[in-house]
Structure formats: structure tokens, C-alpha cells
């Protein structure tokens, strides 16, 4: 359920955007299949479904249905059969058993990201694995399919458990002694060649791997292999398998995940690729190499000609910031420049080494179809250009991330894409921190701000559900002082502003009631603080969802309200 304040601008435009969103959301969402025993297990969400379900189909049947030449088909039902799961649950991850007959699925309520482990099978009732609760780390089957390895609990208090599926016997295994503290660590399990492997990825980007052999951990001596699939981004996105060009995507389309399977005869390779783009938020296709090499992206698949362009904005310190600009073809002149400044949504993330892309959601084409421009800014602090790019916006350099967004906004005005009054900065989670801080630092650069589930207090990280995991990102592990973090912490920046003379742009802050990562009280206090200073700010509550996956109906209602707000504050006449 969505709860909004009646005074939020633009609510008269909600119906317009909601109808566009429903149309753009009509394509199914496909998940990358897992293959075992001649079977393929995958996620599928059809139009109107709240969440994706697990399906199982014969591998050959799925390959035929999802071949590269069928990737833009609009089938309303998937191959195979739907695997029953308990009602009102969301699939947070799954693993197929070695013989392909069972699925170990992470299922939670829509309100929680901490999932329980269930064993699912066609024609059978779901069976819960007692005592196992997991934060996204997919469980791993033993080679004989009789037991599961599970990372139990919420970071950083995870434990490793071994669960016998049929007998219910549970054994807890200590982590490797030299693992050390798991605070800030991202743990994951894999299983192959008869060995369980534990990977610990540190906040600095380094990763260590251990193997479990004869009940004891040993550091893995395997050298890192060169990835067979390379993703090269230039004007588009090129996929190279073993240095051979096999596919090319549009500039706004990106690879979410992939799997490579060599055929038994060793003469060909089957490549499964899951991509995402605004026109098709989640799609999977199967490509046989070399038989289908040089297949190209079908640029005519979209019902509306959209141009996605990669450009670079020059930051105030001389560094080039990559952007992905999306616009209707009809809004560009013969020279490739915009015909006039247009209402513009500017998005970012800029933290934790995460790569920020154009949102793979219907909100992008719905905004473009209504006459706007959409820009994804890959500012420092993200991972778009490797570890150095992350470090350039981390800890004591976090203010550089905020300044990058301001510099990008000014570039977009200078280049004629928009005007400052028409730019609405949009950010979620860490991105919400960045857009809010940028608006406080340079209010004249933006016509409005949308901040979703934002991290607004970077001094008192303990108040947030995952705050202990974020210490390294903000230098709270001893690298930075409270005063340094307060320089870009929105709640502390606002405290230094006394009156409305600051001329803050209108701000919409969105809360997710069941957020397990970010403290909502900071957002409520922030909005109240803007109002006390004479500024315009609104709260928007989504009462059903949390920080992770949300029901499709809630997402559409949320997106329509956000787009309506953006259109209103940017003085846009949407059509």
C-alpha cells in the first residue's frame, strides 16, 4: 500500500504515467537458468504477477524457446512447469540439485530480505529446512544431492551450516581461522569438483577463497583464470567469448549474468546471457557459438525509437565522468543534439564500487515517451572504471562523489540537454545520500530531488540496519573523523542551514516501511527539518515493501507518483 501526503506536487499526472508504465511493463521478466540432469530451472514473472516464480523445463526445450532469434518474442507463458511455493513468498535465490529434480530456494515474505530455505519439487509440497535463514547467499548442494551448505544469518553475524535434507540433521562448521572479522565482508559459497568453496570479498575489493577438504579448510591455491566472456563498453556493449565477438548490445543494455556450457563434442559452446535494458527489463537468450556468431542486437524491437548515447562530462577537477543519456529519437536534431532543453531525470549511485547503469525499469521509457530525458551518471565512488574509481569517491573522498553530480548537472545545462530548473536528481539508498547532499551543497543546480530509501546520516552509522557493514565505505573504521563525514552527511548539512534563504529545491523523500538496511527515522527528521526552514519537502510511504524486491503493483504505483512529481517540479508539460 502506498501512503502519500495529499500536497505532493503532480498527483494529477499519476494516471498518465501509470498507463504508460503498465504498457511498458507488459513484457515478461526472465531469469538465467541453472542446468542439471538435463533440466533447467529459472525464474519467470509474467504480466500482472506480483513476483517471479520458479519454473523447470527440459534443457533442450528451453534452448529452443529462448534461442537468440526469439529474444524479443512476447510469449505470455514460459516453457515447462511452475514449481509450487508457499503463498505470499518472494524468491531471493535458488540452486538446482545435481540430478535436476529438486530446488533449494530462498523464500521470504515481501516485507523481509532474510529468507528461509525450502526444498521445492514438481508435484510435491514445499518442505522447509529447519533453522536455516539466509541473506541472499545461495545454498549449495552436496555432490550426491542429500545435503545443503547454508550461510546462515544476516551479515556480519553469519554462520555456516550443513543440513541433511531428508533426515533434518544439522551440523555447524566453523569458518577458517584466518578469515578474521567478517564485518564489511561479503561471503558466498560455491560447489564444484567435489569441493565446497568459501569466498570472502573484502571492502577493499580483494577476495580470498578457501576449500573444504576432509572436514578442514585450506586456502585455495588455484590461480584466477581469465574470464572467457569479456564485456567491452564503448558506444555500445560488445560481448566477446574467447576473444571472438558474439553479440552486441545497445549502450543502455547490460549483462546481468551469464553461464557458459561447452558441448560434449567440444565443437561448440552454449552461452546463456541475461540482459537488462529500459525497453526489456529482464530477458534471457541462448546463443550457440560458433554457429550463431555475429548475431546483432535487434534495434527495431522497441515500439518507440529511443536513442541511448554514451558521453563524458568534464568534472571541475578535469576528470571525465561517463554518462548514459537516453532520449526519444524525435527530440534530437539532424546534428544529434537536443532540439531544445528538456525535463531531465539525473540518476546516480556513486558508492561501494557498484556499477550504475540506466534503470532497467519501465519508468525510463515512460518518462521518455512523455517528452523527457533520462541520464545515468557514473560518478566516482562506483565501480564503473575499476577499483581506483571506487577509491576516488570513498571515505575522505566522498565529497568528490557529491561534487561530481553537481558537475554533471552543470554540463547537461551547458550542452543544451536541459536547464537547471528542469533537472530532477534521483537516487536510491547510497544514491539518495548523493543527490540529497548535492542539492544541499548546490541548490541552484537542480529543479527537484527524489531520494528513495536514502542513507542520510553517515556519522552515526550504527543507527542503520547494515551500518556495521558500511564502516569502510565511509571511513568509519578509523580512517575518517566524525567531522569529515558530517561534511557530506545530509542531516548534518541541513543542521548548518538556518533559514529558507538557502533556496533548496523541492525534495521528495520515499520511505520503505520494512527497510532492514536504512533507518527511516533519519528521513522523517530530515523532511521536518527542511519544512522548519521554510523549504518544500514531502514524505512518501510504501507500507508493503522493503529495501529489496517489491511487488510489481507497488513498483508501478510508486514509479507513477515519482514521475508525476518530477514532471511537476521541472515545470514539464508531459504528453
Image: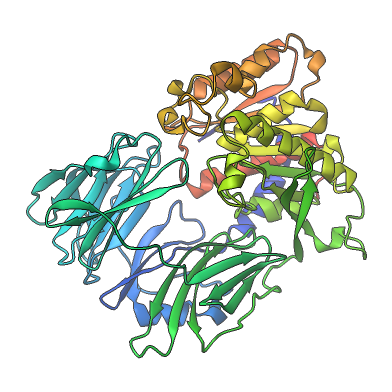
**How many numbered marks have been drawn onto this rendered protein structure?**
0
To which quarter of the image does residue 362 belong?
bottom right
In this rendered view, identify the residue nearer to me: 572 or 439.
439
Viewed as shown, does residue 545 lie left or right of 161? right
Q: Position of residue 248 (x, y in %)?
A: 63, 73
Q: Is residue 499 above or below residue 189?
A: above
In this rendered view, identify the residue nearer to me: 188 or 79.
188
Q: Is residue 504 above or below residue 188?
A: above
In this rendered view, identify the residue nearer to me: 461 or 428.
461
Q: Position of residue 117 (x, y in %)?
A: 25, 49
* Residue lying at 81% horizontally and 32% vertically, measured from the top left: 445
Q: Is residue 47 above or below residue 6?
A: below
In this rendered view, identify the residue nearer to me: 15 or 368.
368
* Residue lying at 28% horizontally and 38% vertically, measured from the top left: 158
Q: Is residue 281 above or below residue 8?
A: below
Q: Position of residue 65 (x, y in %)?
A: 46, 79
Viewed as shown, does residue 192 lie left or right of 320? left
Viewed as shown, does residue 6 lie left or right of 476? right
Q: From this viewpoint, is residue 571 visible?
A: no
To which quarter of the image does residue 429 belong?
top right
* Residue lying at 79% horizontally and 43% vertically, measured from the top left: 318
To which quarter of the image does residue 70 belong?
bottom right
Q: Position of residue 395 (x, y in %)?
A: 56, 31
Identify the image's colour scheme: rainbow, by chain, secondary structure or one colour. rainbow
Q: From this viewpoint, is residue 338 visible?
A: yes
Amino acid at each position: 500500500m502506498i501512503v502519500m501526503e495529499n500536497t505532493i506536487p503532480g498527483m494529477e499526472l499519476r494516471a498518465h504515467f501509470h498507463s504508460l508504465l503498465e504498457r511498458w511493463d507488459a513484457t515478461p521478466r526472465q531469469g538465467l537458468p541453472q542446468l542439471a540432469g538435463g533440466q533447467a530451472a529459472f525464474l519467470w514473472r509474467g504480466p500482472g504477477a506480483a513476483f517471479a516464480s520458479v519454473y523447470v523445463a527440459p534443457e533442450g526445450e528451453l534452448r529452443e524457446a529462448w534461442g537468440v532469434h526469439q529474444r524479443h518474442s512476447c510469449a505470455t507463458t514460459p516453457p515447462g512447469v511452475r514449481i509450487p511455493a508457499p503463498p505470499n513468498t518472494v524468491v531471493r535465490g535458488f540452486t538446482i540439485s545435481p540430478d535436476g529434480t529438486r530446488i533449494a530456494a530462498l523464500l521470504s515474505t515481501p516485507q523481509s530480505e532474510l529468507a528461509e530455505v525450502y526444498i521445492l519439487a514438481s508435484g510435491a509440497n514445499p518442505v522447509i529446512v529447519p533453522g536455516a535463514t539466509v541473506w541472499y547467499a545461495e545454498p549449495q548442494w552436496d555432490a550426491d544431492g542429500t545435503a545443503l551448505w547454508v550461510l546462515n544469518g544476516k551479515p556480519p553475524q553469519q554462520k555456516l551450516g550443513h543440513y541433511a535434507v531428508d533426515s533434518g540433521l544439522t551440523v555447524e562448521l566453523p569458518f577458517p581461522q584466518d578469515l578474521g572479522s567478517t564485518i564489511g565482508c561479503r561471503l558466498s559459497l560455491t560447489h564444484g569438483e567435489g569441493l565446497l568453496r568459501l569466498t570472502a570479498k573484502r571492502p577493499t575489493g580483494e577476495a580470498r577463497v578457501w576449500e573444504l577438504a576432509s572436514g578442514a579448510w585450506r586456502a585455495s591455491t588455484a590461480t584466477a583464470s581469465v574470464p572467457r566472456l569479456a564485456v567491452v563498453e564503448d558506444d555500445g556493449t560488445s560481448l566477446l567469448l574467447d576473444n571472438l565477438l558474439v553479440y552486441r548490445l545497445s549502450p543502455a543494455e547490460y549483462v546481468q549474468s551469464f553461464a557458459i556450457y561447452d558441448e560434449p563434442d567440444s565443437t561448440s559452446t552454449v552461452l546463456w546471457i541475461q540482459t537488462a535494458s529500459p525497453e526489456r527489463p529482464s530477458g534471457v537468450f541462448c546463443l550457440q557459438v560458433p554457429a550463431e556468431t555475429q548475431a546483432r542486437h535487434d534495434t527495431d524491437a522497441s515500439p518507440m525509437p529511443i536513442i541511448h548515447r554514451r558521453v563524458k562530462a568534464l568534472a571541475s577537477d578535469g576528470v571525465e565522468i561517463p554518462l548514459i543519456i537516453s532520449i526519444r529519437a524525435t527530440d534530437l536534431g539532424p546534428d544529434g543534439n537536443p532540439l531544445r532543453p528538456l525535463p531531465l531525470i539525473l540518476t546516480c549511485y556513486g558508492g561501494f564500487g557498484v556499477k550504475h547503469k540506466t534503470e532497467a525499469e519501465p519508468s525510463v521509457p515512460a518518462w521518455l515517451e512523455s517528452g523527457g530525458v533520462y541520464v545515468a551518471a557514473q560518478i566516482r565512488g562506483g565501480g564503473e572504471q575499476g577499483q581506483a574509481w571506487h577509491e576516488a569517491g570513498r571515505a575522505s573522498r566522498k565529497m568528490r562523489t557529491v561534487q561530481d553530480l553537481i558537475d554533471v548537472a552543470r554540463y547537461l545545462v551547458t550542452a543544451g540537454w536541459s536547464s537547471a530548473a528542469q533537472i530532477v536528481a534521483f537516487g536510491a539508498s547510497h544514491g539518495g545520500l548523493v543527490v540529497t547532499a548535492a542539492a544541499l551543497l548546490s541548490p541552484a543546480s537542480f529543479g527537484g530531488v527524489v531520494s528513495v530509501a536514502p542513507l542520510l546520516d553517515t556519522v552515526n552509522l550504527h543507527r542503520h540496519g547494515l551500518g556495521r557493514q558500511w564502516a569502510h565505505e565511509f571511513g568509519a573504521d578509523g580512517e575518517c573523523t566524525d567531522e569529515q563525514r558530517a561534511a557530506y552527511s545530509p542531516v548534518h548539512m541541513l543542521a548548518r542551514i538556518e533559514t529558507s534563504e538557502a533556496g533548496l529545491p523541492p525534495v521528495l523523500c520515499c520511505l520503505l516501511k520494512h527497510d532492514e538496511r536504512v533507518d527511516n527515522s533519519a528521513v522523517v527528521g530530515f523532511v521536518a527539518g527542511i519544512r522548519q526552514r521554510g523549504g518544500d519537502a514531502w514524505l512518501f510511504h510504501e507500507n508493503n515493501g522493503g529495501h529489496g524486491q517489491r511487488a510489481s503493483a507497488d513498483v508501478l504505483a510508486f514509479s507513477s507518483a515519482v514521475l508525476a512529481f518530477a514532471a511537476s517540479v521541472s515545470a514539464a508539460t508531459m504528453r
